[in-house]
Amino acid sequence: MKKIIIANWKMHKLRKEAVDFVENLSAQKEVDIAIIPSFLALRDLKNAAPKEIAIGSQNMSEHSHGAFTGEISASMLKDVGADFVMLGHSERRKIFLESNDVITKKVERAVVENMPFVLCVGETLDERELGETKEVISVMLDALSALIGSHWDLVTIAYEPVWAIGSGKVATPDIISEVHNYIREKLLEFTPEKGEGIRILYGGSVKSDNIAEILSIDNVDGALVGGASLDPLSFNQLINEVSI
Ligand code: 13P
């Protein structure tokens, strides 16, 4: 399966910074690249980026439309050119208190709207130390319960251990391998036909000096990169590591 590197810019970069970044980024044949900017930079980035680079949104309302002040719908995202949406990032879960129930509704909305999505899952340090990692991830993956048939083509999973995000503490290859294998098993339970073809990405302190090792692990089909995706030099370096 072709690997993918996704840059999650979180709450960084104005429109001009986003456009300047992408103008200095060369699309690669060996690896797919996607960028998730702020909502407000989506349209500019979509217009500026080579068409091989997918542009995603960091969140999406579970509602189709209506009186939901401050929310952004799937059709609004499509209207500005978003190719996919990221759902259930741990910062949404932890800081903005998005529950599994809400994230499940967002997954259902993405399916209704035919919007490809990256579902983020991952345990906190406490959960890991209590031996609850698999249970926590299994409950998060239950957000996929309503999916059937060809809808599985919309799905990408990102394993992002909360304790590895922005901390400089990358998960060990053994941890990554164990959890990615577990996620693959769960996907195959959901869909024996499509489970093998669903990408599972790793995220959490991915940098140019660890990306090659991480991507060499079985069932790691790409990476979701925060901090190291903000500087064009370090992001290009990271991509070059994958393309070697
Ligand atoms: P860092 O790469 O900064 O650890 O962030 C990971 C992340 O949250 C990507 O979604």
Image (cartoon, rainbow, N blue to C red):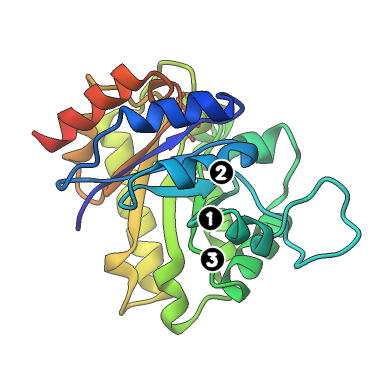
**What residue did someone put label 3 on?**
115
Q: Name the amino acid type tagged 2.
A: Leu
Contact check, label 3 and label 1, Cβ < 8 Å: no
Q: Tell me residue 85's x, y (percent).
A: 54, 53
Crowding near pointer 3: few (<14 within 10 Å), some, many (20+)?
A: many
Crowding near pointer 1: few (<14 within 10 Å), some, many (20+)?
A: some
Instruction: Name, please, the residue furthest toward the right.
Output: 67
Mark 3 or mark 2: whose residue is earlier in sequence: 2
Mark 2 or mark 1: whose residue is earlier in sequence: 2
Q: CA distance from mark 3 to mark 1?
A: 12 Å
Q: Nearer the viewer, residue 172 or 102?
A: 102
Q: Tell me residue 137's x, y (percent).
A: 51, 50
Q: Which quarter of the picture shows residue 58? A: top right
User: Would you say 187 lies left or right of 243 here?
Assistant: right
Contact check, label 2 and label 1, Cβ < 8 Å: yes
Q: Name the amino acid type tagged 1.
A: Gly
Q: CA distance from mark 2 to mark 1?
A: 7 Å
Specify whether tag 2 is near ligand 1 (CB below 8 Å): no
- Which quarter of the image is occupied by the N terminus? bottom left
Label drawn at residue 42: 2
Secondary structure of the residue carrying numbered label 2: helix
Contact check, label 3 and label 2, Cβ < 8 Å: no
Vertical side of 139 occupied by 231: above or below: above
- Which quarter of the image is occupied by the C terminus? top left
